Amino acid sequence: MVNTAGSSDDGELVFTLPWPAPELSPNARVSWPVRARRVRDARGLAYLIALEWRHRTDQRIPLPTPVTADVTFVVTDRRRRDPDNMLARLKPVWDGFVDARLLEDDSAAKFRFGSITFERGEKRKVLIRLRAGP
């Protein structure tokens, strides 16, 4: 899967990321080395995507706070999913964005969630739209 980052017409940043590993779920029963590997991989990928975006643009970094994230999970089936657990799987992504200095911080004062939606599609993926400023 190609991971992309771009800007929409209304100033939002749009990132396309692969489906988060099941081992990142708070309910996953896996050993800590397995979870640590998945966290490292997800955080590193988010870091690289944000870094690539930073090098392609000359926009102010980090994004002005507060930053609002709208998350769309693209699914291929009709199974019900718990939005809270799905968001918890994305914690390494936010940390990777902070590592790349795309986000100043992922604390509640500077980062918040807008909409969390599920859509049907051909391939599972996650679309993240970041809106900066008040």
Image: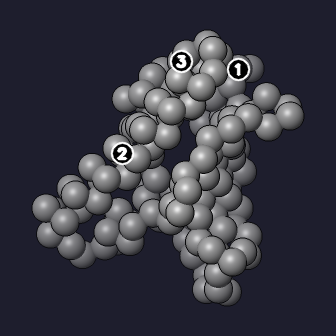
Q: Give the side of residue 49 with respect to residue 68, left or right.
A: left
Q: Earlier in the sequence, mark 3 or mark 2?
A: 2
The residue tagged with tag 3: helix, strand or loop?
Answer: loop
Give the spatial CA distance, label 1 vs label 3. Answer: 11 Å
Which amino acid does the dot numbered 3 rest on? Pro
User: At x 42% / y 38%, what residue is drawn?
Assistant: 48
Q: Residue at x 65, y 86 (%)?
A: 77
- State the residue position of label 1: 133
To which residue does mark 2 refer? 43
Quadrant of the rendered structure where residue 80 is? bottom right
> What crowding class fits label 1: few (fewer than 14 Cα within 10 Å), some (14-19), or many (20 or more)?
few
Q: Amino acid at mark 1?
A: Gly
Q: Is residue 134 visible in this depiction of the protein?
A: yes
How far, Cα to Cα, is label 2 from label 1?
24 Å
Check if mark 2's residue and mark 1's residue have beta carbons within 8 Å.
Answer: no
Name the residue carrying label 3.
62
Mark 1 or mark 3, which has the lower sequence index?
3
Q: Position of residue 41 (x, y in %)?
A: 31, 53
Q: Callout 2, which amino acid? A: Arg
